[in-house]
Amino acid sequence: MRYCYFADYEIQMGERLRIWGQATLVHEIPEGGALDPEIVLARVRQQAATAHGTRPCEVRIRALNRLD
């Protein structure tokens, strides 16, 4: 099964700088497998953190929408 997501996130950098961003994610699970929302959130956070050079725990997901 294939799921596509759009995420809106923010990252607090110090006291004054805040980064807002968006990301898309294609998440596939094996046939008959269960969708685990925790894995989806972890992947989105990791993708955003990698893009901005931060840690995943610093990424706050503001909205997560499934596209299909």
Image (spheres, rainbow, N blue to C red):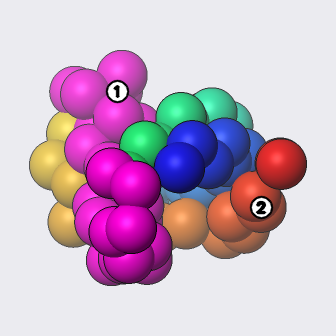
User: Which residue is at the front of the view, 7 or 11?
Assistant: 7
Residue 65: numbered disc: 2
Segment colored magenta:
30-53
User: Identity of the amino acid at label 2?
Assistant: Asn
Where residue 27 sits in the image (x, y, percent)? 46, 44
Residue on which the image places disc 1: 52
Q: Single out the residue that lies furthest toward the left.
A: 55
Residue 57 falls inside the magenta stretch = no
User: Which residue is at the front of the view, 30 or 58?
Assistant: 30
User: Which residue is at the front of the view, 38 or 7?
Assistant: 38
For numbered disc 1, what is the local secondary structure? helix
Task: Identify the residue at horizontal 39%, vertical 67% (top origin).
Answer: 32
Q: Are marks 2 and 1 in contact (CB under 8 Å)?
A: no
Question: Toward which corner of the image does residue 2 lie, by quadrant?
Answer: top right
For numbered disc 2, what is the local secondary structure? strand
Where residue 21 sits in the image (x, y, percent)? 64, 37
Q: Single out the residue that lies furthest toward the front.
A: 32
